[in-house]
Amino acid sequence: MKYMLSDEQKMMQQSCRSYVDKVVLPFIRKDWTREWDMTPGNRLPREILEGAEAVGIRTLGVPEEYGGIELDPATEVQTFALIAEEIARGDSGLADKLVQNWKVSVVLRELAPEHLKKRWFARLLEDPQFLLAHCLTEPRGASDRWLPYNVPEAAMTTRAVKQGNGWVINGRKQFISNGYDAGLYVVYANTNPKVGMLQGTSSFLVPRDTPGLTVARCNETLGCRFMNNGELVFEDMRVPEDHLLAEGDALSKAGTYFRAGKIIQSAKNLGVGVRCFEVASDYAQNYVQGGRILIKHQAVALRLADMATKILAVRALVERAAAAVDDKAPEADCQCNMAKVFASEEIMKVAQHCVELHGGNGMMLDFGVEKLFRDAAIFLHMDGTVDVSRLKIIKAMFPQTAGKYAGPE
């Protein structure tokens, strides 16, 4: 749907596509065992992120005054989605690695004091390997906390207590994108245990070298393995007073992260689906079975048609939801969750068709198709599970009559 894009968006899309075709995909195919390296820092070679820097997509969301690539506010989320799709077509883990930088940059842009913006945006710009992370999920509380069930007992277990001219934080975060190797974290903690999560959660800016912060481990995931998901522990971690980004209402102020995140997540799904269709259609037009190329078999043709239809339907919903977010429309939250659910489930079906169309080759690690299936599968649980997202859709549509879906009625 290039005719709907601005000239700037078309140029960025083409630059990303060229980067993926010339840098990312050749690396993925040439060194397919690399994602299984159990030393997380060795998985992605430096030149991959350097290539992202070269085409100007690593620092999206950083204001121009700090040297970043500032997007048109009227279409910012739509552009994020466009680029996320292109990068995920090459590798969804790399897309997620970059996406966290984009989304956290927007949080800093909106909430951080001036001196911290100057310091950390400069740090981000000077080092192509520098990563950002958003630390919300905990071992005993993730998607279910967003139904919402806004009472004190549902609050985060990570606690921040004011002491002198700073805050002391204790707790643990789990399943954090970029958590294993980020240089700067936005950490959410309970600062008022007497009220609900929406009124008692605060956010803090935490550099990696802060005493009391321990990166406990890298979570070895099924898919998206070129993004190192991490677990963090905070033990009497002291944060200066000026590193408090939002006190009490941090979750509502992070709406710019969450809404854009649902769209970008859906767009990454879409990128994986597009790649599935590319490799499946190429295979079907070149591989001979039963004396004819696969596409001449009706069963194969039907699967390809189904894949193409699902991809177009996902793209239409993602584009509509992204526009709603950019327009700050009242239905944006509901449509974001719809896009997340629909993209997760439909692209999973696309990936299944892709694997099955490759027959036995689809099960071979060195063939590369099973990787797309694994990457698609992980999206069902990223940025909220599909079931919790469905409950949020109903809460948005019928706020007066929908159930609480957590805790007592």
Image (cartoon, rainbow, N blue to C red):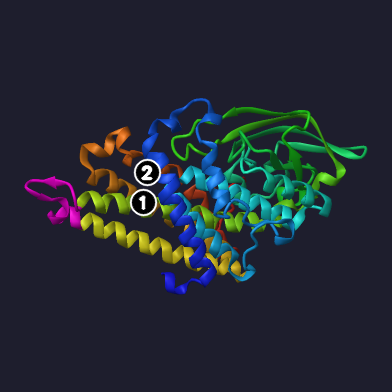
Which of the 4 quarters of the picture holds residue 73?
bottom right
Please determine whether, in this image, residue 196 is positioned above or below residue 179: below
The kind of secondary structure element at disc 2 is helix
Please determine whether, in this image, residue 91 is positioned above or below residue 398: above
Q: Residue at x 48, y 56 (%)?
A: 16
Residue lying furthest right in this view? 164
Out of 20 and 293, give the one closest to the viewer. Answer: 20
Residue 344 visible in image: no
Query: Is residue 123 covered in magenta?
Result: no
Look at the numbered discs 1 and 2 and tell me whether their residues touch, using CB distance below 8 Å. Answer: yes
Out of 320 and 365, give the one closest to the viewer. Answer: 365
- Where in the figure is residue 373, as x and y percent of width and height? 36, 42
Query: Circle 1 sits on which residue?
Result: 275
The CA span between labels 1 and 2 is: 8 Å
Residue type at mark 2 is: Leu
Q: Residue at x 16, y 53 (%)?
A: 299
- Where in the figure is residue 51, as x and y percent of width and height? 53, 47
Q: Is residue 88 left or right of residue 157?
A: left
Start-end of magenta stretch: 285-301
Residue 74 visible in image: yes
Query: Circle 2 sits on which residue?
Result: 372
How crowded pointer 1 is (Cα within 10 Å; few <14, some 14-19, many 20+) is rated as: many
Q: Is residue 165 left or right of residue 18?
A: right
Query: Is residue 290 covered in magenta?
Result: yes
How crowded pointer 2 is (Cα within 10 Å; few <14, some 14-19, many 20+) is rated as: many
Q: Earlier in the sequence, mark 1 or mark 2?
A: 1
Marker disc for residue 393: none
Q: Residue at x 87, y 43 (%)?
A: 241
Residue type at mark 1 is: Arg
The kind of secondary structure element at disc 1 is helix
Q: Is residue 256 left or right of residue 86?
A: right
